[in-house]
Amino acid sequence: LREVPSGDFFPRSQYAAVVVSSADVVFLLGGSNGRHHMNDVWCVRLLRRPDADAEWTWTCTSPHQEARRSANDGQLLLSKWAGRSRSSAAAVLAPKGPSSPRAMYIT
């Protein structure tokens, strides 16, 4: 086991994680940063190189987005799932080709 270097995802608590072991990928979703329930998605990928040690990389695949108020009637509008913590997630893998998630479910 090796420690994954920290990325901009942290500090964070109560987030969901989905591991895709066949692709050396971990997806981290939502959670709380102490002030807000987040709705971002991060990918931590293990890059294997024949001429060097493997290296973990962090990528924000879907940044956090706050709800905004409608100018017409003041209702809150969300363009993605509501921020949450203490949630769960699962990935459905593609039946052929590289093992990358085809769909991700968040509850």
Image: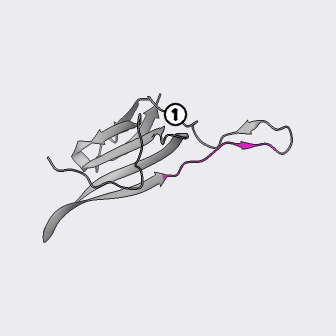
**Residue 61 shown left or right of residue 82 in the figure:** left
The secondary structure that dominates the magenta segment is: loop
Total number of numbered labels?
1
Q: In this view, does 63 lie to the left or right of 45?
A: right
| Residue found at x 36% / y 44% | 27
Q: Residue drawn at (29%, 45%), measured in percent from left and top? A: 96
Q: Helix or strand or loop: what does disc 1 sit on?
A: loop
For residue 76, side relative to residue 27 (left or right)? right
| Image location (x, y in percent) of residue 67 | 67, 42
Name the kind of residue labelled 1 in the image: Arg
Residue 21 is a magenta residue: no
Query: Who is closer to the viewer here, 60 or 15?
Result: 15
Extreme residue in the bottom direction: 51
Report if residue 49 is visible in the image: no
Which quadrant of the view contains residue 46? Answer: bottom left
Give the vertical position of 75 relative to 43 (above or below): above
Q: In this view, does 53 lie above or below 103?
A: below
Residue 55 shows up from this direction: yes
Which residue corresponds to the image point at 43% horizontal and 39% vertical from the top-left? 103
Magenta-tinted stretch? 62-70
Residue 11 image point, x, y percent: 41, 47
Count residues near mark 1 (Cα–Cα under 10 Å), then give few for <14, some for 14-19, many for 20+.
Answer: many
The residue labelled by disc 1 is 84
Q: Locate residue 88, reporting x and y percent.
A: 41, 29
Quarter residue 26 falls in: top left
What percent of the width, then of the height, locates residue 69?
76, 42
Q: Does the magenta stretch include residue 64?
A: yes
Q: Answer above or below: position of 86 versus 7.
A: above
Which residue is pictured at 57% across the width and 37% down the height? 81
Left or right: residue 56 compared with residue 31: left
